[in-house]
Image (tube, rainbow, N blue to C red):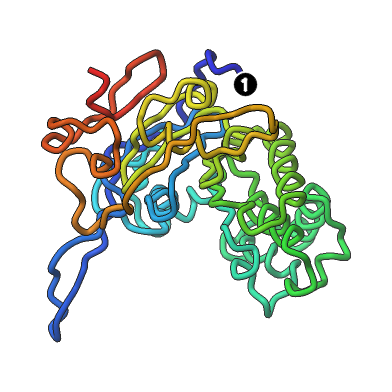
Amino acid sequence: MDDKVRKPDLLIVKNLKKYFPVKKGFFQRIVGDVKAVDDVSFTLQDGETFGLVGESGCGKSTTGRTVLQLLPPTSGEVWYQGKDLTKMNFNQLRRIREDIQMIFQDPYSSLNPRMTIRKILLEPFVIHHKYSKKEREERVDRVLEVVGLTRAHGDRYPHEFSGGQRQRIGIARALIFQPKIIFADEPVSALDVSVQAQVLNLMRDLQEEFKLTYLFIAHDLSVVKHFCTRIGVMYLGRLVELAAKRAISDLPLHPYTKALMSAVPVPDPEVKRHRIILTGDVPNPQNPPSGCSFHPRCQSCFDRCKEARPELKEIASGHYVACHLYG
């Protein structure tokens, strides 16, 4: 997709927050909060693949689960088809989840080991009371073929499959209702490199065939650059940069993004790249630094960075950054 073509927003996330209370003592009194997601806003455009990247523990997976309402948000809004998901009850959310599905990170623990693949794929129809028995069986056979498996695979158990095949089953389960949006939470991080390519190519083919929109959560920037159309970079629960993949790849603006991009391996041994080494550790999300949360590790830090938290602002067309170095 051309980075200059602006498509309609399918999902709108506004000022999303997810805090986990910290309890201590015999009476389990709340003494603080872990700010896993702290005021995150972005949109998903129809038909795009939006990548959410950052170090482990930055809050990207929690963001995805909170958007999908698997975790109740502390505050914020999530708009889909003119409706705020955060205001919906259980039955309303169940209907919406036919349109928004998720592929989980671990292809081993996300499948019930006591159920055959066919029963796993039939279960959503039972929960949602959809279709006749014959139609359910036909749809299961069809979705197994779509992800590169056969009807005979449906009678096997999860332990009889490799990691790549299990992830294909996870993709099949996400496709069972032909959703509009799929959240993919590090879907290839547990797979071998060769299998990663197969799964990514499958997801891309399915996107074209079924007109899917992806929220792709990952920590591997090389995968995100290959697969995504726009990228949002997270640090300590906040978005620090958001732009088209070309802008993030060719001209990163935030010091944290620059450090991440400098760490991406280049397959050409003749190419030499300046490696930016970040000092120190990621701050405690229970007690984040004042001002910009990245300032203790930033080589470009100055006084204002320690005092005021920068807002995410548009520096160029479609390129947003939260840094005092720009404006």
The amino acid on which the numbered mark 1 sits, given as a three-letter code, is Met
Is 313 above or below relative to 20? above
In this view, the residue in front, 134 or 90, is: 90
The N terminus, quarter of image: top right
Tell me the residue that label 1 is attached to. 1
Quarter residue 121 falls in: bottom right
Measured from the top left, where is residue 171 in percent x and y? 67, 52
In this view, the residue in front, 203 or 288, is: 288
Quarter residue 12 falls in: top left
Which residue is drawn at the image coordinates 18% and 30% (left, top)? Answer: 302
Which residue is drawn at the image coordinates 34% and 34% (left, top)? Answer: 240
Which residue is drawn at the image coordinates 70% and 76% (left, top)? Answer: 115
Is 324 above or below relative to 201? above
In this view, the residue in front, 136 or 221, is: 221
In this view, the residue in front, 186 or 204, is: 186
Measured from the top left, where is residue 287 in percent x and y? 19, 56
Is 192 above or below relative to 178? below
Measured from the top left, where is residue 64 in percent x and y? 44, 49
